[in-house]
């Protein structure tokens, strides 16, 4: 649904193995007046499409398949030669504690021959574990999942009840992408994978700057551990030429638009019960806070000097990066102004979004 709202001129197809999920999605689409999207009940592994899709989003699916690689190869076959796919897979450092609990719960039920997991039995065991002398991995996260189960039962089921889950470390992820016939394109939010944001030492920064990107990502994954980002990334066909990095002069000519027009929808019982503008930017104690919630990821907040609110307000009218720099509301060197805006472009935190491809492409 979010993809259909973000790409208003595109033909969008959404699929799910759950008939109930498809019925709810169709109902929400009618409420929103989305005529360009359709929903079908389908299993990914049954898809026979070849080169049919320019852009594929597949988040939270492959790692739950009994054969994740078959699912990835199905996506590769369905993608157009010059297309791209945005994927999300579980990072091991974020899921290992949940796997430990599921394995223990399976043994508690009698092993592979025991009864299937259910919410009541799992919740009883979770309370017993958290209230005992046990010291489970990710204890606080387990406690939060249990606390929110009534409000968010799908997350409870995904975390503690699902029978299939595979997670990856950084090198396993790259090998998985290659085995599926893809080339790794980029992280969905590359700024999250810059190791400099995890270390304060200038000496460490100098050493990190000498590393190849894959080694920088390994540093973030292995040393950042639970502070490391989720595995959200873009893949392409290997035959597709790799695009060159954006040049500074191209970035300055980009038209940008702020996300202040975004709308938050409250959904209950499969219906939209409330719609209101999202609060994207506000000032508090001389700090400008920007909130960004991408359609492929979690919410992020950025803090900047409050005086920049006027400058960023120009983005609503489609100003270019160069125009934003000219109307800077605070004294700052040109390279500082450009650096701040550069951080907010789509290959970083995404608050400013390009209206089109770079000039000359």
Image (cartoon, rainbow, N blue to C red):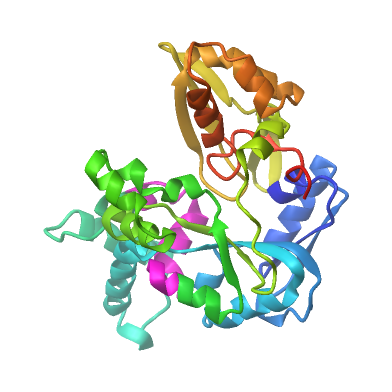
When the figure is inspected, residue 111 is found, relative to residue 146, above or below; the finding is below
When the figure is inspected, residue 135 is found, relative to residue 73, above or below; the finding is above
Q: Nearer the viewer, residue 275 or 351?
A: 351
Residue 257, image x, y percentages: 70, 30
Query: Residue furthest toward the bottom?
Result: 113
Residue 78, image x, y percentages: 74, 74
Residue 296, image x, y percentages: 59, 50
Q: Is residue 347 left or right of residue 50?
A: left
Q: Is residue 168 visible?
A: no
Query: Residue furthest toward the left?
Result: 133
Q: Nearer the viewer, residue 270 or 191?
A: 191
Q: Is residue 85 visible?
A: yes
Residue occupying image coordinates x 40% and y 11%: 285
Name the quadrant containing residue 196.
top left
Q: Is residue 158 magenta?
A: yes
Q: How many marks?
A: 0
Q: Is residue 239 magenta?
A: no
Q: Is residue 201 left or right of residue 64?
A: left
Q: Is residue 272 left or right of residue 182?
A: right
Q: Nearer the viewer, residue 304 or 239?
A: 239
Residue occupying image coordinates x 64% and y 21%: 324
First to last magenta residue range: 144-173
Residue occupying image coordinates x 79% and y 78%: 50
Q: Is residue 97 left or right of residue 247?
A: left
Name the quadrant containing residue 274.
top right
Residue 118, image x, y percentages: 43, 68
């Amino acid at each position: 649904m979010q993809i259909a709202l973000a790409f208003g001129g595109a033909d969008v197809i959404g699929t799910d193995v759950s008939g109930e999920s498809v019925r709810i999605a169709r109902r929400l689409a009618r409420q929103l007046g989305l005529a360009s999207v359709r929903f079908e009940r389908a299993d990914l592994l049954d898809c026979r499409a070849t080169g049919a899709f320019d852009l594929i989003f597949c988040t939270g699916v492959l790692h739950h398949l009994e054969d994740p690689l078959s699912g990835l190869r199905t996506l590769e076959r369905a993608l157009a030669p010059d297309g791209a796919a945005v994927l999300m897979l579980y990072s091991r450092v974020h899921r290992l504690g949940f796997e430990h609990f599921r394995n223990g719960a399976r043994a508690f039920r009698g092993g592979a021959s025991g009864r299937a997991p259910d919410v009541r039995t799992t919740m009883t065991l979770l309370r017993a574990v958290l209230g005992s002398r046990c010291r489970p991995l990710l204890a606080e996260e387990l406690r939060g999942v249990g606390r929110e189960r009534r409000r968010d039962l799908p997350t409870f089921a995904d975390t503690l009840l699902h029978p299939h889950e595979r997670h990856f470390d950084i090198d396993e992820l790259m090998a998985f992408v290659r085995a599926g016939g893809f080339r790794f394109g980029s992280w969905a939010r590359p700024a999250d994978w810059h190791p400099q944001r995890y270390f304060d030492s200038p000496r460490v920064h100098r050493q990190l700057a000498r590393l190849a990107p894959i080694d920088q990502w390994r540093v973030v994954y292995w040393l950042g551990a639970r502070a490391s980002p989720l595995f959200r990334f873009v893949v392409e066909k290997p035959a597709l030429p790799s695009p060159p990095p954006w040049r500074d002069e191209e970035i300055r000519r980009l038209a940008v638009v702020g996300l202040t027009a975004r709308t938050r929808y409250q959904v209950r019982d499969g219906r939209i019960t409330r719609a209101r503008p999202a609060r994207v930017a506000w000032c508090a104690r001389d700090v400008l806070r920007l909130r960004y919630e991408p359609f492929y990821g979690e919410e992020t907040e950025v803090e900047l000097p409050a005086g920049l609110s006027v400058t960023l307000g120009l983005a609503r009218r489609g100003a270019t990066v160069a125009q934003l720099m000219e109307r800077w509301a605070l004294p700052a060197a040109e390279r500082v102004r450009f650096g701040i805006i550069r951080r907010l472009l789509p290959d970083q935190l995404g608050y400013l979004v390009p209206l089109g491809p770079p000039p000359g492409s």
